[in-house]
Image (cartoon, rainbow, N blue to C red):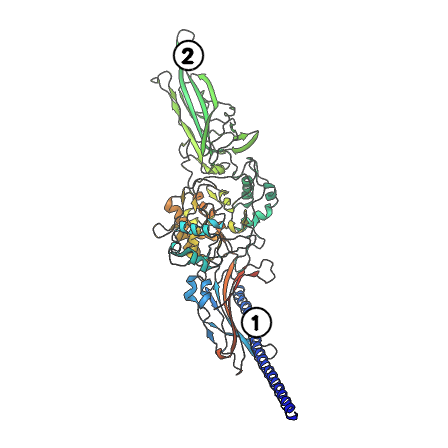
């Protein structure tokens, strides 16, 4: 029994030992597992920290990239970048290069820049406390400021150029879009594009002639046109003056407007300002410059203007009974003045007008002739309401003599002077001519016994004004042949006859200033340089005044300083050619290899004037008027001045300059510098890549030394 109980106790002791050993084994396993887990967590945490550090270094890269291009632009006082691609550059003795333009980042960069991307330098990041290298970064900056915005361009027909939707995308040369229809289909199917890759893939070969868009990007934002800053110094720091205002508001801006007109080189600024008031106000009564006599200035109101004056006489031979069964020869002499008015405006008037002629002073040869007409003051003409582009004439009897029997029968009109001739409506005078010199002499009329009873003889002479807006000035009148009912023969020179237009309301488009006379025959505010063709040199009013919407932030426009003539051509292509705003389209500007390349020539001119180093950045669209292509266009197509300027009017609002747009490709690496000789590839502990689209305003509007900047788009690149 004793042995039996001992055996059972030994068995229990063994089981306890096994259990303890098992428990210890489990504890060891748990301890090892925990140790491995902790080591993994420590490594993962360390890796996360390194990744987080690398991501923070991306912020450093972006900040340095922004500082890099900003210092370049401000240092050189540029409105538009003078580079296509800019890389991070280490000025140290042994820079380390890296190719960061690989993989997914290429999908964000315009295809035409792909061959320009070069290896960037790694720039070190040091711990500010220890001086130890803890990371490095590199970047490439691509200038995307000068492209078409695919979210706007080509989505509507080309009209007056009021918004970016009208920009033509077809007929670019070399071609980019297969056809405007294919592009319109793409943009109507997909309302918005967020990236170039998306734009390329969705468009495909049916849209893009080269497989990828070349002249498009997917974002644009142009700050207000309310300021004017032209390098190297501000020339219009007072800002652009709004013209989309009532005549009452405009009248309060007289001093400032006249100062701007003077700065633009516009002659007679005070008179031109009064013309501008006439252009804007709703009435048809001409304003007058300060201290000017009534209507002694060039006219802008939409009224019929005195254009040609003809003086004629008629001597009539008749017989009357002499009381004794015989007949006496008698002669009647009448003197007439015919007045022609011209209404050179594109819309019918709704207002009735009358012409009034004052009594003239009549002279004859031989002096004292019994046939000298007695001057009379005729009544007004019948009321007339002029139609568009119409002439109206009325003849007045201004002198007559009772039947007389002179001997010899010879008389001529010589040394006569006209009285005042006016056009009135509702009791107000809207046009007036007082011709100072003696009127041209009329040929002498004579009769002989061989002339039959009832004979009528006379002659006529006329004077015509070069430009009816100048009819108040006698020096602009001349005898140039009778042309009643048509444009005067002497209506030549300078810009030549052109359609006149009056808004009778706030200015909608600053280019309408091109309809205002500057006080010389057929010379108006010049939107383009036509000095070589007899017109005025350029008056850059587009850069000094603003119209509707020009003071708002706008999307979808084109930077006037773009280095891509193809983009400039797209803006100019299909621009309507018209006689006046809202008028019928007579033709359209063309582009492409198959035509005269009108738009291409002007685009190339603009590029040469605005792109460094041949030109200079500009802060407004008046540069369009500096191109030789416009003057050539006038000659080649036989256009009038208003038709040439319609190209500018229908184009300039599609251009602005207040946009810098940069795509920044970035790489950043965290690391541990083990050899105290910068971080090398073997010492890298984390790597991050990203792209960012950064917008910058090239104008320091507040004068505080800072240029508004924001990040429009940011994306991490995972590969």
Q: Do the residues labelled 2 and 1 touch (CB within 8 Å)?
A: no
Q: Quadrant of the N terminus?
A: bottom right
Above or below residue 440? Residue 19 is below
From the top left corner, tell me how far across and down residue 342 is, in percent: 46, 33
Residue 173 or 652: which is nearer the viewer? 173
Question: In front: mark 2 or mark 1?
Answer: 1
Looking at the picture, does residue 341 appear above or below residue 571? above
Pick the front one: 21 or 287? 21
Residue 57 x, y percent position in the rendering? 55, 71
Give the CA separation, mark 2 to mark 1: 122 Å
Q: Where does residue 472 sit, x and y in percent of width and height?
A: 51, 36
Q: Which element type, helix, strand or loop, lies under badge 1? A: helix
**Image vertical order of residue 137 relative to residue 298, above or below:** below
Residue at the front extreme, as displayed: 1
N-terminal label among 2 and 1: 1
Q: How many residues crowd mark 2 within 10 Å: few (<14), some (14–19), many (20+)?
A: few
Q: What label does residue 320 carry, if any?
A: 2
Q: Nearer the viewer, residue 54 or 409?
A: 54
**444 left or right, relative to 125:** left
Query: Which residue is labeled 1 in the image?
Result: 52
Q: In which quarter of the image is residue 237?
A: bottom right
């Amino acid at each position: 029994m004793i042995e039996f109980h001992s055996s059972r106790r030994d068995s229990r002791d063994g089981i306890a030992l096994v259990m303890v050993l098992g428990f210890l084994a489990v504890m060891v396993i748990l301890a090892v597992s925990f140790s491995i887990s902790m080591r993994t967590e420590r490594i993962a945490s360390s890796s996360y920290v390194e990744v987080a550090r690398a991501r923070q270094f991306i912020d450093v890269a972006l900040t340095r990239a922004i500082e890099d291009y900003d210092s370049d632009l401000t240092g050189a006082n540029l409105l538009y970048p003078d580079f296509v691609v800019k890389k991070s550059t280490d000025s140290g003795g042994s820079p380390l290069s890296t190719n960061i333009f690989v993989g997914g980042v290429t999908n964000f960069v315009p295809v035409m820049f792909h061959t320009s991307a070069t290896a960037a330098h790694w720039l070190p990041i040091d711990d500010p406390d220890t001086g130890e290298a803890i990371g490095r970064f590199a970047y490439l900056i691509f200038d995307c400021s000068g492209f078409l915005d695919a979210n706007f361009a080509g989505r509507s027909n080309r009209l007056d150029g009021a918004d970016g939707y009208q920009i033509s995308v077809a007929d670019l040369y070399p071609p980019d879009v297969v056809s405007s229809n294919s592009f319109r289909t793409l943009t109507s199917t997909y309302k918005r594009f967020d990236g170039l890759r998306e734009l390329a893939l969705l468009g495909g070969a049916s849209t893009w002639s080269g497989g990828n868009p070349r002249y498009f990007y997917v974002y644009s934002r142009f700050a207000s046109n309310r300021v004017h800053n032209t390098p190297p110094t501000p020339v219009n720091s007072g800002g652009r003056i709004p013209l989309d205002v009532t005549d009452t508001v405009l009248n309060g801006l007289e001093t400032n407007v006249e100062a701007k007109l003077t700065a633009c080189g516009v002659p007679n600024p005070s008179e031109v300002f009064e013309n501008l008031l006439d252009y804007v106000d709703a009435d048809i009564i001409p304003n007058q410059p300060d201290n000017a006599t009534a209507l002694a200035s060039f006219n802008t109101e939409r009224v019929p203007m005195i254009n040609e004056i003809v003086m004629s006489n008629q001597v009539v031979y008749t017989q009357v009974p002499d009381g004794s069964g015989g007949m006496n020869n008698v002669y009647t002499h009448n003197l007439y003045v015919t007045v022609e008015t011209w209404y050179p405006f594109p819309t019918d008037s709704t207002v009735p007008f009358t012409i009034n002629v004052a009594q003239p002073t009549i002279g004859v040869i031989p002096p004292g002739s019994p046939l000298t007409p007695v001057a009379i003051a005729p009544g007004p003409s019948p009321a007339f309401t002029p139609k568009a582009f119409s002439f109206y004439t009325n003849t007045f009897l201004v002198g007559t003599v009772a039947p007389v029997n002179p001997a010899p029968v010879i008389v001529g009109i010589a040394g006569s002077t006209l009285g005042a001739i006016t056009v009135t409506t509702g009791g107000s005078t809207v046009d007036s001519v007082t011709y100072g010199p003696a009127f041209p002499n009329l040929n002498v009329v004579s009769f002989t016994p061989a002339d039959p009873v009832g004979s009528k003889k006379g002659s006529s002479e006329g004077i015509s004004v070069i430009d009816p807006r100048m009819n108040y000035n006698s020096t602009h009148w001349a005898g140039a042949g009778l042309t009643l009912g048509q444009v005067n023969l002497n209506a030549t020179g300078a810009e030549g006859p052109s359609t006149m237009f009056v808004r009778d309301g706030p200015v909608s488009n600053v280019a309408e200033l091109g309809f205002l006379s500057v006080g010389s025959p057929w010379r108006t505010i010049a939107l383009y340089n036509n000095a070589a063709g007899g017109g005025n040199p350029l008056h850059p009013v587009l850069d000094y005044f603003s119209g509707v919407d020009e003071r708002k932030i706008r999307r979808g426009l084109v930077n006037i300083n773009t280095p891509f003539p193809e983009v400039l051509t797209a803006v100019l292509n299909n621009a309507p050619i018209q006689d006046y705003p809202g008028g019928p389209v007579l033709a359209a500007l063309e582009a492409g290899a198959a035509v005269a390349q009108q738009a291409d020539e002007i685009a190339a001119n603009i590029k040469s004037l605005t792109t460094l180093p041949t030109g200079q950045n500009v802060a407004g669209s008046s540069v369009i008027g500096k191109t030789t292509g416009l003057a050539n266009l006038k000659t080649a197509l036989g256009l009038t001045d208003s038709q040439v300027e319609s190209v500018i009017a229908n184009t300039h609002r599609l251009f602005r300059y207040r946009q810098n747009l940069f795509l920044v490709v970035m790489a950043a690496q965290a690391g541990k510098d083990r050899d105290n000789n910068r971080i090398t590839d073997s010492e890298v502990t984390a790597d991050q890549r990203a792209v960012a689209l950064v917008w910058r305003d090239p104008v320091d509007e507040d004068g505080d030394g800072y240029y508004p900047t924001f990040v429009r788009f940011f994306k991490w690149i995972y590969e």
